[in-house]
Image (cartoon, rainbow, N blue to C red):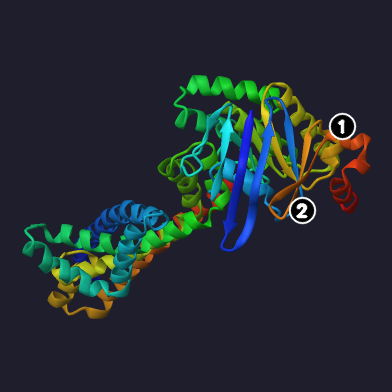
Amino acid sequence: MIAVMHDALPYLIRGTLVTLQIAFFSSLIGFFGGTLLGFIQTSSNSLLRFLVTIYVTIFRGTPMLIQIPFFYYLLPEIGIELSLFATAVVAIGLNSMAYISQIVRSGIVSIGKGQREAAHVLGFSSWQTMRYILFPQAIRTVVPALLNEFITLIKDSSLASTIGVVELFKEGTIIISRTYAVIPVYCAIALIYLTLTTALSCVAAVIERRMNKHAHH
Amino acid sequence: MLIIKNLCKKFNSAVILDSVSLRVERGEVALLLGKSGVGKSTLLRILNSLDKADSGLVTVDGKMLDLSANQSNLTIGMIFQQWNLFDHLTVEQNITLPLEKVLQKSKIEAHAIAHKLLVQYGLETKADDSIMQLSGGQKQRLAIARALALNPKVLCADEPTSALDPLLTHFVAENIQQLAQEGLTVLVASHDTALISQLNCTIYLMEAGKIVETAKSEAFRAHKEQYPLIHKFVGNH
């Protein structure tokens, strides 16, 4: 078994790197897109708010296990040719956008209306109020939730295997099909996921502590 | 000079402002006195385009304000009851940010204006502190400094003394008087009757959205019996 694991290790490391890349790039889409959607949900434009609500309802209300293959088949149909990796990143990123938009929205809503009113009286436009007053305060309150979302993405990235992206989970299943070492390989994969998410949880805790300390000074 | 003519405001069927008219000269302090909910704050909010009036007009130095505009009119400044300072910024940034982003001043210019105001209000050593490190009185002074940085002609203060102890109330009253002497038109909404003895102002007593009695503060202090409604209000508070 040690020999099997020894041989499997380079593949698992390679898969881990792909997993991290999927989580990283899809979280970028999720963060920037989700922030924009969060802004829209707190804006006064009811049509845009309605459209975002539909988006959020669809992406939060359907399994990612369906969303990823859906994009895999849909994108070529509408003339967009992406690699498997990019397709997975886009699908997971769009899903993450829906969740992050709600995190950002709740952060903005949590800022008292006094801040908005003060900005208005001082002549800030709606966009400037969002950019310079509300968002910087909201982001502080939602950083722990955003980091949790990133941790979730690491685990969710395993679903990219459904369209053939060779990330950590897929590397594991390939090794299993070759070696039949089911339990050791699954344990190894689980351990890697656990290590990644625990390390990120620790980073999140440190960031959260620092931000709280900063907020109290 | 601030002129308000026949300002009306309803929320659903409730009358908040019932044809309010008043005229405040340059360098004068107007004290809108009354219980909570009589429309004092709504009047200030309308002047600052935080609420919309149903009808009426407002002019500042002869120029009519667009009361339906969503954009604030910088000729009128506001000091909020809870100050509404920007907690994520330093003391100085609270003043410089609007100067840089709204008035498009350079960083150097904005810093110079902020520094002058911070010195004037005794906050120069606090420039880099966060808002949470300030006392109530210091927050009050910063709120005034921030409003003045934009060089308004009219300054509104909503319950400026409600969160302050008597000593600071006296300081705020002195400050308001000083601002008026420097040429600002000042409109104070308050239920704090202590301000009557500390300000040289025109008192407008409001009840149910209407101005029901008006008096110069000196005249009221000398002949209270001639102003029965204000006298009664002061007696009850």
In the image, residue A16 sits, relative to residue B187, either above or below, namely: below
Q: Nearer the viewer, residue A49 or B117?
A: A49
Number of numbered callouts drawn = 2
Q: Is residue B23 visible?
A: yes
Residue B48 % position (x, y): 57, 41
Kindly identify the residue that appears in the image at 70 percent across and 50 percent down.
B210
Q: In the rendered structure, the residue with mark 1 lies on which chain?
A: B
Classed neighbour count for the residue bearing mark 2: other residues with Cα under 10 Å, few (<14), some (14–19), many (≥20)? some
Q: In which quadrant will I find the N terminus of chain B?
A: top right
Q: Nearer the viewer, residue B57 or B174?
A: B57
In the image, residue B9 sits, relative to residue B83, either above or below, namely: below
Q: Nearer the viewer, residue B74 or A136?
A: B74
In this rendering, position of residue A82 left or right of residue B195: left
Q: In the rendered structure, the residue with mark 2 lies on which chain?
A: B
Q: In the drawing, what numbered circle is on residue A81?
A: none
Q: Are marks 1 and 2 in contact (CB under 8 Å)?
A: no
Quarter occupied by residue A46? bottom left
Quarter occupied by residue A45? bottom left
Say which residue label 1 marks: B218
Q: Amino acid at mark 2?
A: Lys
Which mark's residue is nearer the viewer, 1 or 2? 1
Q: Secondary structure at mark 1?
A: helix
Q: In the drawing, what numbered circle is on residue B35?
A: 2
Q: Is residue B128 visible?
A: no
Residue A32 % position (x, y): 32, 51
Residue A114 % position (x, y): 58, 49
Q: Amino acid at mark 1?
A: Glu
Classed neighbour count for the residue bearing mark 1: other residues with Cα under 10 Å, few (<14), some (14–19), many (≥20)? some
In this rendering, position of residue B96 left or right of residue A52: right
Q: CA distance from mark 1 to mark 2?
A: 22 Å
